[in-house]
Amino acid sequence: MAGRWERPPELSEYEAERQERRATNLIWNAAGDYSLHPDSRAYDAEGYADVYMNSIVGAVYKYYDYPVLRKLLDGMENAPNGDAYADLFWTGLENCAYQRALPDRPALRLLREGYARMILRQAEGVHELDLPVTDRLKLEHYARILGKGQKLTAREEKILAAVEFGPELTSEEIVARMRDVLANYFGVTGGMLRREAMGKLPQFMGGFGRKKFTLGARVRSGDVKKVKTAKLGPMARISGEKSPQQLREFVSDCFGVSMYSKADNDNIEERLCRDKHAGSMLHFTRGELPAHEVRSGEIILQRKQNRAQAEANRRYYNANIVAHRLAIIRLTERVRNCILVHLDDSMLKSRAGALDARTVWRAVYLNDPRIFLKHERASDTELSVDLLLDGSASQLQRQESVASQAYILAESLTRCGVPVRVMSFCTVADCTVMRVYRDYGEVKNNGAVFEYAAAGFNRDGLALRAVGQLLSKSPYERRLLITLSDCSPNDVRKICDEQGRRREYQGEQGVTDSAGEVEKLRRMGVRVMCVFTGEEADLPNARRIYGRELVRIRHISQFADAVGRVIVSLISSM
């Protein structure tokens, strides 16, 4: 399990990098830590990231002291037959990590059962004595999950009982238990697990010298390009290797059906998915899920996570409701006053409104009650605001605060009579998903913003380009775009630079592309600002992309003043 192999020939370098990122994303989601740099990932024989086992790796990072476990894994990696021992170790870690993670992620049950069925299918037609002892134990472990276990020898029963670690064990106790198993049943002592260990280890219980046959995904250290993995069925493959049509169905099942017909969506992609974004796909949705039954464990898990996150967003808002309502009141006041001062197209005489002191004499001497001024704004010159939320996995640790900030903005602008549209974006494989929570005329639908949930990568430049497409159809003359983003573009699909070289869509390349799309929007007459939600290290990127129209919120009490100041400045200059 721990050895380093060359990349399988059927997997291109581009696809290998994609799967490494996919595995990392699955681990991030399970660990709840986007800053994590995992050095263990799970792949199938063709190099594709395994959904269930990468979720287990993430759970191990979350609930255990991984550096303690890694010391033992490092020793196994360099010992003869170490990959078999490490595979057995991960079978034990799966047992305890699953039990620790299940209360928080109930969909793991379905993924685990699917993974177990896949392992049993792999073993069909293979005589048990042709399996290494570690694979026999692994096969029995997953067979028992499905209620299909068969009797092992007394010695094998003791090994399996020892390595099926319980959730009550600490990291140190797990390592001690595994060292005892290796020493007592395989004759592998601590000295044999050091990096400098050489020579042949003794063979016990048969198996190691027999026909090689591996089961399930293997958890490996390092880059998938340097790792060969065990044979797997299609269970571990998800969005990364799907055909365009399969990918569209996948994102539709996860995020909602398309807002557009196939012909309309094809036309949009033809215009937008070109040059640096050639080969990319777009999916616009209102979040309405298809009616057909879904059986995919990955899709079911994603839907459950989305529902759970929506509930968490609402709880977070209500838990801080006083501060949030105060921010709405203060921001509403600032924006309303600015609109009245700077966007007056005409002031008409009226029986109600703002008193015009110059005409009070008309009420006294001419009995004319129209001594007030009423603001009238022509419909073709009204202000509209679009909110664009970064919905990628980089926001996992702040989903609740992003949703609350978006709601505060949408509610404040709605109270000012400003048409508001709220969207989010994320990228799954080659497809950038644009989710619309509420449109301009839906004044009572601000609560839909709490359905915001983070997942996938973020191809900021293409998302901004897609927003430009939507804004080009806007009936409003004065348009303001507010993004809530960590300003850290990162996607698996590479781009071509001006010299035709393929570059990673992150760092300099991603920032330059995003800044270029912001500049195009501004040339369209769209005012663009950003509410920065990221870390200190990404502030230079944010300034490069958005310039001075940038706000960083450290506490919700600052929200109304900081955001209001920039909005007022932009409206004043319209």
Image (cartoon, rainbow, N blue to C red):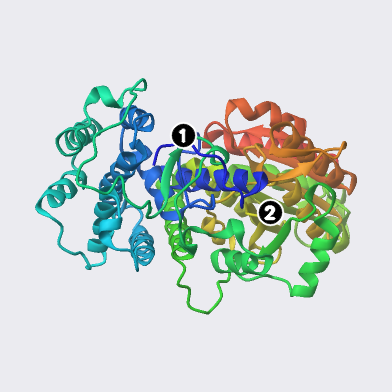
Q: Nearer the viewer, residue 458 or 408?
A: 458
- Residue positioned most to the left: 154
How many labels sit on residues?
Answer: 2
**Residue projecting furthest to the bottom:** 292
Camera-side residue of 383 and 72: 72
Q: Secondary structure at mark 1?
A: loop
Q: Residues within 10 Å of mark 1 (few under 14, many from 20)?
A: few
Mark 2 element type? loop
**Mark 2: few/some/many CA within 10 Å (<14, 14-19, 20+):** some
User: Which of 97 and 287 lies nearest the eye of the viewer?
Assistant: 97
Asked if one can make out residue 523 in the rendered structure from this viewpoint, the answer is yes
Q: Give the left or right position of residue 518, taking residue 299 as reference.
A: right
Quadrant in the picture for residue 63: top left
Query: What quarter of the picture does the C terminus occupy?
Result: top right
Query: Does label 2 or label 1 sit earlier along the sequence?
Result: 1
The residue where tag 1 is placed is 39
From the top left corner, tell me how far across and down residue 390 is, in percent.
62, 47
Q: Nearer the viewer, residue 443 or 172?
A: 172
Instruction: Name the residue carrying label 2.
Output: 416
In this view of the protein, can residue 401 be seen by the observer? no
Q: Residue at x 33, y 32 (%)?
A: 76
Q: Amino acid at mark 1?
A: Asp
Question: Where on the picture, by quarter, is residue 249?
Answer: bottom right
2 vs 1, front mark: 1
